[in-house]
Image: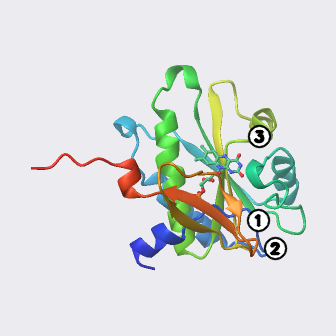
Amino acid sequence: MEFHDILQKRRTVRLYQQKKVEKEKIISLLNAARLSSCAMNKQGLRYAAVTEKNMLKKIFNGTLWAALVKPYRTPVWGESAPDCFIVVHGPAEKNASYVKFDVGAAVMSMELQACDLGLGCCWLGSFDHEEVKNLLKLDENRQVYAVVAVGYPAEEPQYKDIKLNEDQSYYLDDNKRLTVPKYTVDAVAEFYEE
Ligand SMILES: Cc1cc2nc3c(=O)[nH]c(=O)nc-3n(C[C@H](O)[C@H](O)[C@H](O)COP(=O)(O)O)c2cc1C
């Protein structure tokens, strides 16, 4: 896919086909993550790719999805849940002021790569941190920063350009398609030109 098309097409996906994601594809996402920009090139992030069903379900049970359109984009275990979670963890916050930026870069790279491979992702900030930490047996020096759901999409969200005075809340359109308003370039950028 052309990069421009990936940028247009990549939307957060929250409903998934019950289809296995091939390990090579998961490795491609991890490859995208590890090649991403990070402060001072420290590379303190680590990734846990979880497809084992018991662990998957335990993580799934602690997640919260699409609060603005609840319950229509809340996946159901066994029906529309993701096949994989990629957990992103790093040094605990107190000594690690740049880590969250690194996480953003890594997760975005994975989302773009996933889109190019026909997969969908949801970056989850709402999850049971303690449960995930315990499952992965992480000590107190590590912090879980993100959980990324991965699977074959069972929905095709779209974006819609909006002006600065319009509501940016995502919603379901008349066809129940998830629609994500995005401010235009004119709304969010200024130019300082010759
Ligand atoms: C830091 C961060 C945390 C997020 N946490 C959640 C979450 O817990 N649950 C959820 O359903 N979506 C979550 N999202 C997804 C956002 O809702 C989504 O990116 C936003 O609505 C824009 O949609 P788009 O990704 O299609 O552009 C999160 C996104 C980011 C960047």
> Residue flagged by tag 2: what amino acid is it?
Gln
In-front residue for pair 111/138: 111
- Mark sitting earlier along the chain (2/3): 2
Element type at mark 3: helix
| Crowd tier of the residue under label 2, counting other residues whose Cα lies within 10 Å: few below 14, some 14–19, many 20 or above | some
142 displayed left or right of 83? left
4 displayed left or right of 111? left
Across and down, in percent, residue 80 comes to 83, 67
Element type at mark 1: loop
The reply to whether callout 2 and callout 3 are in contact (CB within 8 Å) is no
| Crowd tier of the residue under label 1, counting other residues whose Cα lies within 10 Å: few below 14, some 14–19, many 20 or above | many
In-front residue for pair 76/177: 177
Disc 2 marks which residue? 18
> Residue flagged by tag 1: what amino acid is it?
Asp
Q: How far apart, in angstroms, are the residues tagged by discs 2 and 1?
A: 7 Å
What residue is drawn where x is 77% and y is 40%? 132
Element type at mark 2: loop
Across and down, in percent, residue 117 comes to 56, 75
Disc 1 marks which residue? 83
Across and down, in percent, residue 60 comes to 82, 51
Residue depth check, mark 2 versus mark 3: number of the one nearer the observer: 2
- Mark sitting earlier along the chain (2/1): 2
What residue is drawn where x is 62% and y is 65%? 26
Disc 3 marks which residue? 132
Q: Point out the image quarter for the N terminus.
A: bottom left
Within the image, what quadrant is residue 76 found in? bottom right
The reply to whether callout 3 and callout 1 are in contact (CB within 8 Å) is no
Is residue 28 visible in the rendered image? The answer is no
> Residue flagged by tag 3: what amino acid is it?
Val
In-front residue for pair 13/77: 13
